[in-house]
Image (cartoon, coloured by chain):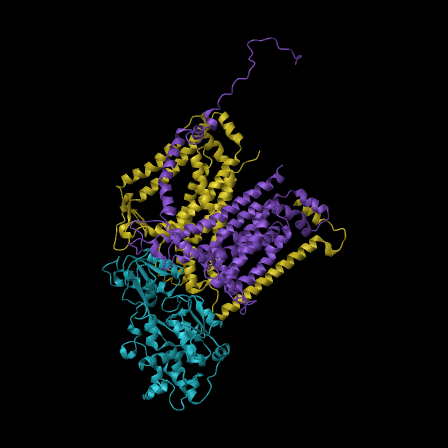
Amino acid sequence: MAATDQVLGSEDSRGSLLYNPVVRGVFFQILVFGGLCAFLYWIVHNTQENLARAGRNVSFDFLYQRAGFDVGQSLIQYSSDSTQLDALIVGLLNTLLVAAAGIVTATIIGFVVGIGRLSRNWLIRKFCQVYVETFRNIPPLLVIFFWYLGVLAILPGPRDSFKLPFGSLLSNRGLFVPKPVWEEGSWLVGVAFLIAIAMGFFVARKASARQAATGQRFPVFWTNVALIVGLPLLALAAAGFPLSFSIPKLGAFQATGGLAIGPEFLALYLALSLYTASFIAEIVRAGILGVSKGQTEAAYALGLRPGATTRLVIVPQAMRIIVPPLTSQYLNLTKNSSLAIAVGYADLVSIGGTILNKSGESIQIVAIWMVVYLSISLATSLFMNWFNSRVALVER
Amino acid sequence: MGAVMQPPDLAYVRTDLAAPLPPPTGQNSVLGWLRTNLFATLPDAVLTVLGLLILWFAIPPLISWLFLDAQWTGTDRTFCATVAQGGMQPEGWSGACWAFVSAKFQQFLFNVYPAGERWRVILCGIMFAALLVPFLVPRAPFKKLNAILLFLVLPVVSYFLLLGGHFGLRYVPTRDWGGFMVTIILSYVGIAVSLPLGVILALGRRSRLPVIKLLSVIFIEAVRGVPLITVLFMATKMLPLFMPDNMKIDDFLCVLIGVALFASAYMAEVIRGGLQAIPRGQYEGADSLGLGYWQKMRLIILPQALTLVIPGIVNTFIGLFKDTSLVYIVNMFDLLGAVRRNFNDANWITPQTPLSGLIFAGFVFWCFCFGMSRYSSYMERRLDTGHRK
Amino acid sequence: MKTTVKVMLGAAALGLAVPTASAATLDDVKAKGVLRCAVNTGLAGFAAPNDKGEFAGFDVDYCKAVAAAIFNDPSKVEYTPTTAKDRFEVLANGTVDMVARNTTWTLSRDTTLGFNFAGINYYDGQGFMINAKKLQGINSALQLSGASVCVQTGTTTELNLADYFKSNNLDYSPVVFEKIEEVNAAYDSGRCDVYTTDQSGLYSIRLGLTAPDDHVVLPEIISKEPLGPLVRHGDDQWFDIVKWTHNALIIAEEFGITQANVEEMKNSDNPEIKRVLGMEENSKFGTDLGLGEDWVVNIIKAVGNYGEIFERNIGSGSPLKIARGVNGLWTKGGLQYAPPIR
């Protein structure tokens, strides 16, 4: 491009302003910009007229009005007396919840299937291929409907719930699992957990320093597992077990007590995870295939075992290829979570839609959606760029 | 090396060929194949046995649900419901309700397009197929004419044919359109609009004019950063607000505009990849020939860049094809929407209906998307040879 | 209402043409030869396509009645199926001449939206439906604490629901959907215990369920939803025609004028009946409205009186089997009352 610029940007031999590329460029830009401004003015003008005719004006005051409607699932305190802004926040949190859960699950399934597609085992390879080819080629909305209408809706009613281990119940009202109830003194457990994590970091650093210095190795992984599980348990015992579980019980209507996970969330979560996992699997496969075979051979020549080769040689290099497309899959999953509206899961779009239907404030609601999703996209890209720069190949 | 010598009479040198040994069992016997591919190591063997067990338990019920126990014919829900559910099937019966699919097949294709007028849709479909197939076959002649017919003549003809209201054809409002027909129309218009628009946006993004570049980047990134649903909501709820009072804009048109703009942002990124892959020498060569910007792009760069990204374009198109199902949320009925809508027909409500309908819709989507991805990799292989260094 | 009638009668008595702000809708309709009427896209009993694909139902009969009053031909109607969202827009922008689509009369719809309601043809209210077979022993909404409730989102129904459960200190979990068909399917599949919407809607939805007889509508009514046909502001003559078509239907029921006996009723000795049917000497009620003198006769011949319309479409003669209840005549303990034709 630099060369092109020089050629086009050089002094014009004909000397006419008309043929001067710089002048033409400026003129063309002014033309486009002016046209766009005129178009925007036209739109704004029409909108203002339309709004004036309908006796409405664009303001965000409606956000502070009483919402008046209830929401099926909320991570924060919410009732119909809360404001519409609170309702939107509830929706945003629900979006983030399902996206986060979906991303974790999709990554796990995606990596397993992606590696499975390269397995020496023919059967496993075919399994993974069928999985990937199936989910990649059907619309995500269809997968959501499949879970919601095809599977969860035909489960038995709440009174004939399937009884699962640990007192969990599964019915067409969703999954009810025991809910931990923290009592007095349980803060100790949280503190112990944080201390354990901090100690884990410390141990890891010390161990790697020692290995670099003396060549002696230290079982970091198992030490940390022991720390992170053991310390909170000790704290629990020290505080006299201030923990009880609320077990779901069959009630007159649906189960009471416990933690209710609605079929809307389940359907969306399962569908997004399975759908996105098929794309992640392909990315993982491409990433692993992208590491040249010489690397494996060199690792074997050094005497590394296949497991260690994968862990120490292949994966770190494959991650460089995997991370950028993985980012866009995470973003796709987050954006696809807006399909919640099709099954009535109370996400940002769904709650925004309710307010939009109720108050008709379409411009503001659509603007809020756009701003929120763009911010999520931007934040994810920034984080992933940072991560990518850490794992990127340092050219020497 | 020394001179060639006549070999002396050496009795210990064998003169006849040794009989070939049988190949190692790992190479081509069934057992060997099994050994290397299924039971190479202990973990492999465990996985294989597990996989076989899953197949053993999953396949027979699946086949009997899909085919053996399925209800293929019937006129209403009683054929697909058990006695307790008010039907005629024995207690405990479970099987696909293909009767539902065959009874509603016409609706899946056309939704509520008037029955007497459906020949118009079919005619458009035949014309579309007749133009599309030669367009996709690389060896077929008359590509230019074909493209003109497909992208310029067909839309006009289809517009008059499908909407009617002229030439003695009955007017069919777009709210009666639906089914697979809408899926095809949306994807077709989406690709036909997004391709040229994507080219312009991609060129804009690589332009050295700062205003143009900024505007293109803003548009592309803004559209790619939000879900299609919000774009569709914007198209259906806000576009009418943007229009002057006397201009009524059809809901279907709003959706078409939304889908096309959405697809063009993704298309722009694909084409930008193609533009970046063209060696700088091509740009310089065109400049040295004295070609202007548009001449350079039209004659030298774009033909190469577009051919290079045909697989990417097809993949974008697959995404677009799948995304058309989202119009259901703004009250249009594409194939999936039409299927979904018929679950609510009181005449057909059974526990088996939704699953059967969804599997049917999924199968149709799968066939098209899988076909397209195969086509994409075929093109990739075909084009690959020319660019391998 | 009374004042309006007085003013109208006064104007008529003076022989003044009622001034119209915008175009005279009646002339428009007559010129086109067809009445354009917005109805529901499909609500069994109120407006839904029948086996032959023609619209039929309670609201549809109101369109037919107005067409009969104007053209003496109930078939001269062009139906526009509308959703809850676009019903007001099509009326405001002149796509249709009137709306008969189970629409609640509220102040803001009169003022902000600029419409006139021509009367209340159905006193409705939000109610609850449950599956009595599964939930035995529940016969009041106050027993519903802890239930999950299916409701269409973005509607006043959703807001009323929240208020009712809150004011009665009851717990519930809402299950919301954008489209009414999705709500129906979710309720039918057992996703929720309770379905809430207008009672008329509940009766109509019940018909479409897998086992209609298992479901009962609970007695509580938690909101006032007076439904009626509506027209645009600014054309009082047209408003009068729709309003008095509705009144004539009720008056006919009061006097026992039915589709079957309307011809012989014309010869009745009762001066009131004669006046209603335009048989009075030098009667000019019809012409003052802009219609023929036999307008009431035409209406009744086309669709019958209010009671007949009710019974045929949503009452005992229909699968919905809605009791007359508050929609009975005022003389029979109901609320249906019409000002006199005189």
A77 and C81: which one is in front? C81
Is B229 placed above or below A165 here? below
- Residue drawn at x 74%, y 51% is A12
Residue A25 showing in the rendered view: yes
- Lateral position of residue C284 relative to residue C163, left or right: right
In the figure, the shade used to draw chain A is yellow
In the figure, is residue A11 to the left or right of C278? Answer: right
Q: Position of residue A344 (x, y in %)?
A: 39, 56
A8 shown above or below A281: below
A94 or B56, which is in the foreground? B56
In the rendered structure, the answer to whether residue A27 lies left or right of residue B190 reads right
**Front-lying residue, B98 or A357:** B98
Locate residue B166: give its quadrant. Answer: bottom right
Q: Which chain is cyan?
A: C
Q: Quadrant of the C terminus of chain C?
A: bottom left
Residue A127 drawn at (x, y percent): 43, 39
- If the image is split into quadrants, where does the N terminus of chain C sit? bottom left
Left of B8 or right of it: where is C252? Answer: left
Residue positioned most to the left: C137
* Residue C342 position (above or below residue C305): below
Can residue C342 be seen here?
no
Q: Which chain, by letter, is purple?
A: B
Picture quadrant of residue A46: bottom right
Q: Position of residue A90 (x, y in %)?
A: 39, 55
Q: Quadrant of residue C168?
A: bottom left
Q: Position of residue B223 (x, y in %)?
A: 52, 53
Closer to us: B383 or B129: B129
